[in-house]
Image: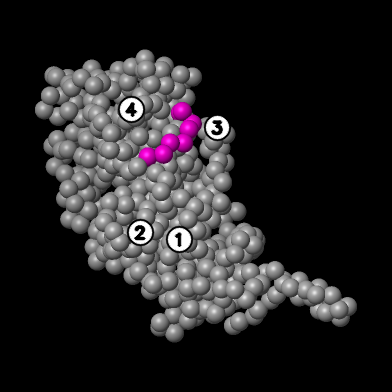
Amino acid sequence: MRAPVRNMMAAASLLALTGASYEPSIIREYNVGVPMRDGTILSADVVRPGTDERVPVVLIRTPYGRATERYAEMGNWWAERGYAFVVQDVRGRGDSGGVFQPFIDEATDGFDTQSWAGRQSWSTGKVGTAGGSYLGWTQVYPASLNNPHLAAMIPAVTAPDPHRNFPLQFGVPMVAAAHWAALVDGRQRQSFDHVDLASAYHQLPLIDFDRAIGRRLPLWREWLDHPTYDDYWRAREYQTSLRKSLAPAMHVSGWYDDVLVGTLQNFAALSTRSPPAGFQKLVIGPWGHKVNAGRKLGAIDFGPQAMIDYDNLQKRWFDRWLKGIDNGIDREPPVRLFVMGANIWRDEWEWPLARTVYTRFYLRSSGRANGSAGDGRLDLKPPGKEPSDRFQYDPANPVPLITAPDATQVGGPDDYSEVQKRDDLLVYTTARLTSQIEVCGPIKVRLYASTSARDTDWSAQLQLVRADGYVQRLNDGIVRARYRRSIAKPEFVKPGSVEPYDIDLWATCIAVKPGERLRVQIASSAYPKFDRNLNTGGPIARESRGVIAHQQIFHDRRRPSHILLPIVPARAGR
């Protein structure tokens, strides 16, 4: 199980024969067996400095395969800077033993691996964890156990509790989660180079996605067996227990990360605790699910400041907490945000920002808000007596959310100007701004709506209408009618009854310049990001036929549908 390999070993032997001196700079050990408490052996690679001195450990645990060029390069980078780098296949993946059950074993396996890394003869006993997406989950699940060797964390693009966002968002399946379930099928990362994912998503019933791509995915079917919040999802939560974590953590994400909310909620929950809880830091850039990947995302160029020296930021974090170097990172403002539009970074002291003025923008119209050619408007003035807006939702022709069909990036700053030529969506737009405002913080929509169906969906999207006509998505959300009151106890609606619906659009941060406008798009689908509601009230993802729903949005004195926007005034002295 243990196969040590010393860098340039053959060269060292040659130098010994010639009488020259040689000291290896890096030691590599492959397929190192790490025992778990139940006897399962997990496989890890170790890259560390060729020195007799003990060094702190940077630990990554992944379901995507540890034996990659990327991790080899990361190992060299950390070893050259005085750290041991350990990358491990999680249980049931790659060369690790056991069965992969997402979320279930990450707390105890993470704890046991941290203990192993802290006890090695080459370790100082200080362990820092890093990585993004599922690799963020492998950090936050064991964090509440407070392993004495865990000195700091860098969880990036970390989703919240699984039932809250991915693979289901408050009872609504995220269709791309089917691709993720297929990606981690078996022990090795699967390839989809010749698979038509878009066609497979269109398969009805949705649960048969796996058959459409020639696979059998128990994980996908298991998720769909539990659309409500039940004991299955309770066993997979971490956010409540995470509040007990004492480790300093730097939380990193992007405004276009489709699981952004996990990063924001985890930072907010941990940063408000009293000592001895560890210092927390938040960094949100103009990125998608892949952090710091470039200055452009889709068609939008966020400028030269969009990219940061992320490697050295992580090093500063670990230098402070693993090596005890007083580099001042814990005395800096803990929140660093990229303000899109202005394309600048700004330092703050909390999230959400304390000076935020939460402002209602009301949905208004004369009853013809259908599409961009309609008369819908966003207004600070509350409505009086106004007619409702109507549209027809046909699940056979859902309103699209622009996205690639895989799970690596769900949506971005895409242009919805063509989509909004449809009349089965509603559009509400502000007047052109005469002075700049900044929208930076959590976003929520309150709709008063009725439907002809027993069950349907309501989706909302906040957009920036640029001066050149580009309609840029900022963020979106959805609510399923049966879960409007509780995701634990579904309740169908009475056709024709007017109900309030709250839609969480997570957050954004953008400077809206003079001449630009803000827009809210309302529909009953956002496909293929979210499962199409077939409007029947039948079992989720198990039906093949839908019915057309006749939808009505109300905005009058008694039912003032609105979006609550976080308007951030400039700080004094700016």
Q: Are marks 1 and 2 in contact (CB under 8 Å)?
A: yes
What residue lies at 19% left-to-right and 51% top-to-bottom? 486
**Image spot of residue 195 (x, y percent):** 56, 53
* First of labels 1, 2 by sequence position: 2
Q: In terms of depth relative to the viewer, which is nearer, 541 or 302?
A: 302
**Image spot of residue 260 (x, y percent):** 39, 47
Q: Are marks 1 and 4 in contact (CB under 8 Å)?
A: no
- Chain part drawn in magenta: 341-348
Q: Is residue 128 visible?
A: yes
Q: Name the residue at the top extreme.
A: 434
Q: Secondary structure at mark 3?
A: loop
Q: What is the distance, in whole Å, between disc 1 and disc 2 at their CAs?
A: 10 Å
Q: What is the distance, in whole Å, between disc 3 and disc 1 at their CAs?
A: 32 Å
* First of labels 3, 2 by sequence position: 2
Residue to which mark 2 is pinned: 278
Q: Secondary structure at mark 4?
A: loop
Instruction: Tell me the amino acid under the disc marked 4.
Output: Ala
Quadrant showing the C terminus: top left
Quadrant showing the N terminus: bottom right
Task: Between label 3 and label 2, give the one nearer the viewer.
Answer: 2
Q: Residues within 10 Å of mark 3 (few under 14, many from 20)?
A: some
Q: Residues within 10 Å of mark 1 (few under 14, many from 20)?
A: many
Q: Residues within 10 Å of mark 2 (few under 14, many from 20)?
A: some
* First of labels 4, 2 by sequence position: 2
Residue to which mark 4 is pinned: 572
* First of labels 3, 1 by sequence position: 3
Q: Are marks 3 and 2 in contact (CB under 8 Å)?
A: no
Tell me if residue 506 comes above or below residue 205 in the rendering.
above
Q: Are marks 4 and 3 in contact (CB under 8 Å)?
A: no
Q: In terms of depth relative to the viewer, which is nearer, 413 or 204?
A: 413
What residue lies at 31% left-to-right and 45% top-to-bottom? 533
Residue 376, quarter of the rendered image: top left
